[in-house]
């Protein structure tokens, strides 16, 4: 019988051996083999003598797993039941990671085996079932994953089913699936390096990096634009494309991208944002940001909404962000993307926030007047600005104490050399009132009318000697000073006469003698032009104590 030389296992047609035959390894022909020996020889892999595993089946057993290759789709029957389609896969007879891995098929199932428990989570498996694989549903999650191929879960609520199949164990084409997952979820993955820093004057340096893309590792070089490196600078061209400023070395400290196609100039005391990228080929890029705002606005700026097209497909990845103030020579901030988290969108617009109508910031006063100012408030207006009441000429502007019956006071005081004006507008009278009574009226002819009493609620005290002292008891009173000879009215120290801060004392000269207000030692009286005498008989004035200083007063009214 002729020798049979076997160099590979024939698969196109069965090999038939009717008797022991000599076989050849290479050119040797002096071996005898049975059919089983021939099969073993063809199945055997290269190995170290005596190894536990050596065959092609062992490779299957060790490197692959139980799971689905095709089919096994779970379908809602719309009546609280499911149908599971037929399918193929791999399974083991025992729950061991090295047990023989078997190809198998299963039949479609829509019967009792996949009956679902209501108001519960149901787990759908294909079980080995002693060599007769079948689809089953159970409320118990199985741990024997080698002998049970998981297809998905179904939560049943009556006839409504919630089916999840994406968690099933799919083992077909697993290498490509793994690469695809890495590409889509972890592109341009960092091992080390790629850290940006400031170098020179507005230059950028980046350290050498080590990375993975899919199942390939690679490196990128270090760059320092203060020495020799450069980067491409990008901004939107206004028509959907990009403009490139090649061979750049410094971060721009005067411009930002406003989307018009031409770089705009940063406003004074504002900050621009610049996004730093590096490509897998080591190329270095910077993209202008759209921010022209305060530092806090720049720090909250979102990532660019779009990027140059060659950044796509993981060609380039974000390395960090640079913030610089207008005309500054140093960065206000430089942050690496590997230790900082940047906003995914644009800077937050206050109008987009929810809950803006909620009154939960009690340090602010609502414009609807629903809450009062609870402490002293300095209302400072820019030069030339006014407070306007109403929207038409007939509307009133009222600045009033909350309760006319309390002992508190309202003061409008000028503390600088400029003018403080109360302006009633054309064809309107200017009225100063205390309580509900008009105290001073200036009509459209500029005629000033001072009422006989400055307050309907004020107590009148008559002083008639030529030397009088303002007493604490006179607070909120109207002092009528009546003498034919001059009268000196002295304001004493707080130690002697303890007035409240902002205390008011109303003065009226009712006699012919001129009333002059004098300050005791240690007391200061401020008045327009330094005038301290009332302007003749029946002239009126007001003394008001400072709201903070104990021995400082203000005198205002008809003075001479």
Image (cartoon, grey):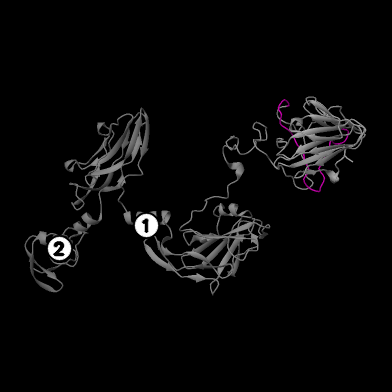
Instruction: Report the residue at 26% width, 32% height from top.
Output: 111
Residue 52 position, x and y percent, is 14, 60
Q: Is residue 404 left or right of residue 72?
A: right
Near mark 2 (Cα within 10 A), the count class, few <14, some 14-19 or many ≥20, is few
Pointer 1 residue = 179
In what quadrant of the picture does the N terminus appear? bottom left
Q: Is residue 131 above or below residue 329?
A: above
Q: Is residue 237 left or right of residue 436?
A: left
Residue 288 position, x and y percent, is 59, 60
> Which picture quadrant has residue 448?
top right
Residue 285 or residue 520, whichever sits in front: 520
Q: Is residue 129 above or below residue 181?
A: above
Residue 342 position, x and y percent, is 51, 53
Residue 281 or residue 255, whichever sits in front: 255
- Give me the disc on residue 51: 2
Residue 50 or residue 304, whichever sits in front: 304
Q: Secondary structure at mark 1?
A: helix
Magenta-drawn stretch, dominant element (helix, strand or loop): loop
Q: Which stretch appears magenta? A: 404-428
> Which picture quadrant has residue 184?
bottom left
Residue 417 position, x and y percent, is 81, 48
Instruction: Report the residue at 53% width, 72% height from top.
Output: 229
In what quadrant of the picture does the C terminus appear? top right
Instruction: Report the residue at 50% width, 59% height from top.
Output: 312
Q: Is residue 422 visible?
A: no
């Amino acid at each position: 019988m002729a020798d049979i030389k076997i160099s590979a296992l024939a698969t196109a047609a069965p090999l038939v051996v009717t008797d022991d035959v000599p076989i050849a390894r290479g050119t040797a022909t002096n071996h005898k083999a049975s059919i089983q020996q021939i099969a073993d020889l063809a199945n055997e892999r290269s190995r170290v003598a005596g190894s536990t595993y050596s065959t092609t089946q062992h490779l299957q057993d060790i490197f692959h797993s139980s799971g689905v290759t095709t089919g096994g789709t779970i379908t809602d029957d719309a009546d609280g039941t499911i149908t599971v389609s037929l399918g193929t896969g791999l399974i083991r007879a025992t729950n061991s990671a090295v047990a023989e891995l078997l190809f198998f098929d299963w039949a479609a199932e829509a019967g009792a085996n996949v009956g679902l428990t209501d108001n519960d989570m149901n787990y759908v498996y294909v079980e080995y079932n002693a060599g007769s694989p079948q689809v089953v549903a159970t409320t118990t999650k199985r741990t024997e994953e080698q002998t049970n191929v998981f297809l998905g879960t179904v939560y049943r609520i009556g006839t409504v089913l919630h089916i999840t199949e994406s968690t099933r164990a799919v083992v077909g084409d697993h290498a490509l699936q793994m690469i695809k997952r890495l590409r889509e979820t972890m592109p341009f993955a960092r091992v080390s390096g790629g850290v940006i820093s400031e170098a020179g004057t507005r230059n950028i340096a980046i350290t050498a990096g080590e990375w993975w893309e899919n199942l390939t590792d690679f490196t990128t070089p270090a760059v320092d634009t203060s020495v020799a490196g450069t980067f491409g600078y990008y901004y939107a061209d206004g028509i959907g494309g990009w403009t490139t400023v090649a061979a750049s070395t410094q971060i721009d400290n005067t411009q930002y991208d406003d989307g018009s196609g031409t770089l705009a100039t940063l406003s004074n005391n504002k900050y621009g944002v610049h996004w730093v990228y590096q490509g897998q080929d080591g190329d270095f890029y910077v993209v202008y940001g759209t921010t022209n705002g305060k530092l806090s606005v720049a720090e909250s700026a979102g990532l660019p909404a779009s990027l140059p097209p060659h950044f796509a497909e993981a060609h380039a990845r974000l390395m960090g962000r640079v913030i610089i103030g207008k005309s500054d020579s140093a960065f206000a901030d430089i942050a690496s993307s590997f230790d900082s988290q940047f906003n995914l969108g644009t800077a937050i617009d206050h109008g987009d926030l929810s809950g803006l109508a909620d009154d939960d910031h009690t340090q602010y006063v609502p414009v609807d007047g629903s809450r009062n100012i609870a402490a002293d408030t300095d209302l400072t207006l820019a030069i030339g600005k006014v407070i306007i009441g109403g929207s038409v000429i007939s509307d009133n502007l009222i600045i009033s104490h909350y309760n006319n019956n309390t002992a508190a006071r309202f003061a409008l005081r000028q503390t600088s050399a400029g003018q403080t004006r109360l302006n009633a507008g054309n064809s309107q009278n200017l009225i100063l009132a205390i309580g509900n009574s008009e105290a001073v009226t200036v009509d459209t002819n500029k005629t000033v009318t001072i009422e006989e009493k400055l307050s309907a609620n004020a107590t009148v005290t008559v002083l008639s000697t030529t030397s009088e002292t303002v007493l604490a008891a006179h607070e909120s009173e109207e002092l009528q000073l009546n003498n034919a000879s001059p009268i000196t009215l002295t304001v004493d120290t707080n130690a002697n006469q303890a007035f409240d801060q902002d205390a008011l004392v109303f003065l009226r000269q009712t006699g012919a003698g001129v009333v002059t207000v004098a300050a005791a030692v240690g007391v200061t009286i401020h008045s327009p032009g330094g005038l301290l005498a009332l302007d003749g008989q029946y002239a009126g004035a007001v003394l008001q104590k400072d709201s903070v200083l104990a021995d400082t007063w203000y005198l205002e009214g008809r003075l001479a």
